Image (spheres, grey):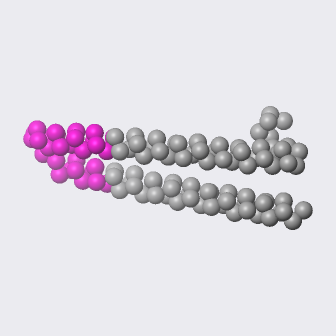
């Protein structure tokens, strides 16, 4: 009986760490979006719209940031997908051991 209680404590601690990491990830993402928006606003304010070099630099910067943003979003979704797989495995293990329902994930 104590073994299952210890496993539940370990699972709860792991889930808490995952939730804390997700909160910090979301907070960091919000900070970076705000920072980049402020920088873009500064560039647009100080840009000479008649100079083609300024437009070229703006397009180049947006292309580079777009590629980086796409990679970061893809990595974030991959990590979220992997985490969901791990949580489903933990849930299936608990269901196989205890025979308890899986919190409505099986449609009941």
Residue 3 percent across, percent down from the top left: 84, 63
Residue 60 percent across, percent down from the top left: 22, 41
Residue plotted at (16% across, 47% down): 47
Query: Does 15 sit left or right of 63 as displayed?
Result: right
* Above or below, comparing residue 1 to residue 56 in the picture: below
In this view of the protein, which residue sits in the foreground, 106 or 43? 106
Farthest residue in the left direction? 51
Residue 4 percent across, percent down from the top left: 84, 59
Does the segment drawn in magenta span residue 64? yes
Residue plotted at (73% across, 49% down): 90
Query: Does 82 sit left or right of 74 as displayed?
Result: right
Farthest residue in the top direction? 107
Image quadrant assignment for residue 19: bottom right
Does the segment drawn in magenta span residue 56? yes
Image quadrant assignment for residue 66: top left
Question: Which image quarter holds the C terminus?
Answer: top right
């Amino acid at each position: 009986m104590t073994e299952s209680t210890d496993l539940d404590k370990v699972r709860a601690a792991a889930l808490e760490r995952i939730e804390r990491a997700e909160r910090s990830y979301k907070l960091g993402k919000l900070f970076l979006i705000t920072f980049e928006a402020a920088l873009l606003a500064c560039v647009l304010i100080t840009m000479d719209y008649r100079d083609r070099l300024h437009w070229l630099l703006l397009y180049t910067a947006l292309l580079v940031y777009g590629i980086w943003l796409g990679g970061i979003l893809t990595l974030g979704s991959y990590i979220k997908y992997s985490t969901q797989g791990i949580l489903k495995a933990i849930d299936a293990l608990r269901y196989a051991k205890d025979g308890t329902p899986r919190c409505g994930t099986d449609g009941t």
